[in-house]
Each structure stands twice: as C-alpha cells, then as structure tokens.
Amino acid sequence: MAVSLQQVACVGRNTFQASKSAARRPKTPVVKGVAGMPWSTEAKRNPAALILSTGLAWAAVTLSASAADLSSGEDVFSGNCAACHSGGGNVIEASRTLQKDAITQYLDGGLSEAAIVKQVQNGKNAMPAWSGRLSEDEINDVAAYVYDQASNDKW
Ligand code: HEC
C-alpha cells in the first residue's frame, strides 16, 4: 500500500512537473534510486503518455460510434418503421406520433431510449413486435434515432 501510494505520488510529480524534474532528476538521489527500478521515471512517463493518447483515441471512437448509430438507426427506420411512421407520424393511430409530446404522453415509460427500445421489442396493439426480426443492435440504433429526432424536435 505504501509503495503504491509512493508510486502514485511519483507519477503525479512526473506528469505535472515534468520539465522541472527532468532538469533536476540526475542530481536527486531519491529519484535516481527509483530510476533504477523497473518502474523507472522514464518508463513511467511513456505509459502516462500512452494512457493519455489511448483516452483520446477512445473518445474519438466513442464519438464516431454514436454518430454511426444514428445513421444506421435512420436506415433501420426507413426500412421498417416509415411505412407507419413516415416523417414521425402515425398512419394507423393518428394521435400516436413519434413527436416529443405524443411519446411523452403515450409511450409506457415516457420519452427515453430505453422505453422506445422496449416498445420496439414487444410491440403494442397495432404496432408489431420487432425482436427476432431486427437485431439487438438495430433496435438500439433505431431507438437512438427516434429518441434524437423526438427530443430535439427534428420532425
Ligand atoms: C404496422 C405499423 C407500424 C410499424 C411498422 C411500426 N409502428 Fe410504431 N406504432 C404503431 C402504432 C399503431 C403505434 C401506437 C400503439 C398504441 O399505443 O396503441 C405505434 C407507436 C410507436 C411508438 C410510441 C409513440 C406514441 O406516441 O405512443 C414508438 C416509439 C414507435 N411506434 C416506434 C416504432 C419504430 C421505431 C418502428 C420501427 C422499428 C415502428 N414503430 C414500426 C404502428 C407501427
């Protein structure tokens, strides 16, 4: 425990005072001792950079993944839902549109992605159930798309 706390302190110092400690490092006995260990300051600084860049890469992937979900959701929607819900309307039950107000009022669970997923999976009255016909990913994507359209008044 004591060792790992010390390691954390070292990482903090190297990360936040990199330029200062780099200048002093060769003359500081404590740091010199640590530098000889497997978790030397040099070895540690690279992982810190690695963690940072991994974090950035992850954020980029996450952003592009959610953008892809919406566009794939749009495809699923036009292929499967638009027959009844073209433009966010409802050709069978005129009041049950996919507008924010209607969803908030009529959808079990209100306006949330999870509630949309549930209704798409199970259907309701004249709306057919889609589990088994659409994959889990397709249902999640189309729910994300409908939620985005409704909550941002896009239709
Ligand atoms: C055969 C026509 C039909 C298709 C196809 C259809 N729906 Fe529906 N949908 C309905 C009907 C009818 C309702 C109203 C159900 C009720 O409350 O009685 C409804 C309601 C909804 C609601 C709740 C809206 C509200 O105001 O209550 C959502 C969300 C929804 N549908 C999403 C979808 C999605 C997403 C798809 C495609 C995967 C889809 N629907 C495909 C007929 C359809």
Image: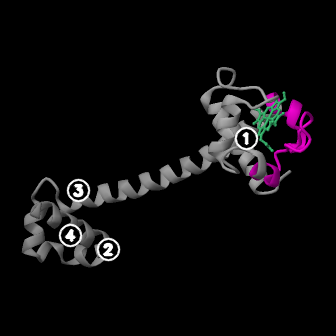
1 or 2: tag closer to the N-terminus: 2
Figure check: 15 above or below 53 = below
Colouring used for the render: one colour
**Mark 4, mark 1: which one is toward the viewer?**
1
Figure check: 1 above or below 65 = below
**Mark 1, mark 3: which one is toward the viewer?**
1
Residue 16 disc label? 2
Is residue 9 in view from this perspective? yes
Q: Which residue does the image show at 70% across and 33% down from the upper left?
A: 120
Which amino acid type is marked by label 3? Answer: Ala
Which amino acid type is marked by label 2? Answer: Phe
Which amino acid type is marked by label 1? Answer: Ser
**Percent position of residue 24, x then y:** 19, 78
Is 22 magenta? The answer is: no
2 or 3: tag closer to the N-terminus: 2
Q: Residues within 10 Å of mark 3 (few under 14, many from 20)?
A: few
Is residue 68 in view from this perspective? no
Of the pair 48 and 67, the residue shown nearer to us: 67
The quarter of the picture where the N terminus appears is bottom left
Cα–Cα gap, marks 3 and 4: 15 Å
Whether label 1 touches label 3, CB < 8 Å: no
Q: Residues within 10 Å of mark 1 (few under 14, many from 20)?
A: some
Cα–Cα gap, marks 1 and 2: 41 Å
The residue where tag 1 is placed is: 71
| Total residue callouts | 4
**Label 3 CB, ligand 1: below 8 Å?**
no
Residue 43 disc label? 3
Q: Which residue does the image show at 69% across and 44% down from the upper left?
A: 108
Cα–Cα gap, marks 2 and 3: 16 Å
4 or 1: tag closer to the N-terminus: 4
Whether label 3 touches label 4, CB < 8 Å: no
Horizontal side of residue 137 vs 20, given as left or right: right
